[in-house]
Image (cartoon, helix red, strand yellow):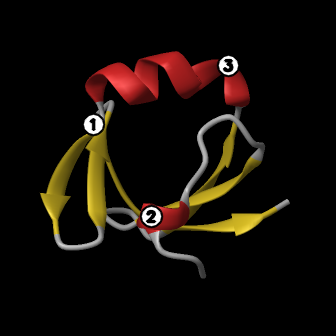
């Protein structure tokens, strides 16, 4: 799994949501909202839209 500091919200991928230990298919149309509202939660973890994103994998 790739770290969130290498995540590109403009590219489709699968992001890992650490709170529920699930993967979510990322949609590039969410990129603008991500850039506006995503915030560091913990080291390597991004809080976004009620989710705790801690990694990603290519589609």
On the rendered image, what quadrant is the N terminus found in? Answer: bottom right
Rendered position, 10 above or below 1: above
Task: Give the mark nearer the N terminus: 1 vs 2.
Answer: 2
**Within 10 Å of the Cα at label 1, are there few (<14), some (14-19), or many (20+) other Cα atoms?**
few
Instruction: Find out whether the residues at labels 1 and 2 contact each other: C-beta distance under 8 Å.
Output: no
On the rendered image, what quadrant is the C terminus found in? Answer: bottom right
The image quarter containing residue 56 is bottom right
As helix, strand or loop, the secondary structure at mark 2 comes to helix
Q: Is residue 10 left or right of residue 17?
A: right
Instruction: Find out whether the residues at labels 3 and 1 contact each other: C-beta distance under 8 Å.
Output: no
Q: Position of residue 19 (x, y in %)?
A: 30, 63
Name the residue at 44% across, 64% down: 4
3D distance between C-alphas at marks 1 and 2 = 16 Å
Q: Residue furthest bottom?
A: 1
Q: Is residue 47 left or right of residue 6?
A: left
Q: Residue furthest right?
A: 59
Name the residue at 28% across, 64% down: 45
Task: Give the mark nearer the N terminus: 2 vs 3.
Answer: 2
3D distance between C-alphas at marks 3 and 1 = 18 Å
Write down the residue under mark 3: 29
Q: Position of residue 41 (x, y in %)?
A: 15, 56
As helix, strand or loop, the secondary structure at mark 3 comes to helix
Write down the residue under mark 1: 50
Total marks placed:
3
The image quarter containing residue 5 is bottom left
Rendered position, 3 above or below 25: below
Name the residue at 27% across, 36% down: 50
Write down the residue under mark 2: 4
Q: Position of residue 46 (x, y in %)?
A: 29, 53
Front residue of 21/13: it is: 13
Task: Give the mark nearer the N terminus: 3 vs 1.
Answer: 3
Name the residue at 18% across, 73% down: 43
């Amino acid at each position: 799994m790739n770290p969130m500091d290498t995540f590109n919200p403009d590219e489709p991928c699968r992001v890992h949501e650490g709170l529920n230990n699930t993967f979510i298919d990322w949609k590039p149309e969410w990129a603008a909202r991500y850039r506006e509202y995503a915030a560091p939660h913990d080291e390597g973890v991004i809080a976004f839209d009620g989710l705790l994103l801690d990694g990603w994998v290519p589609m």
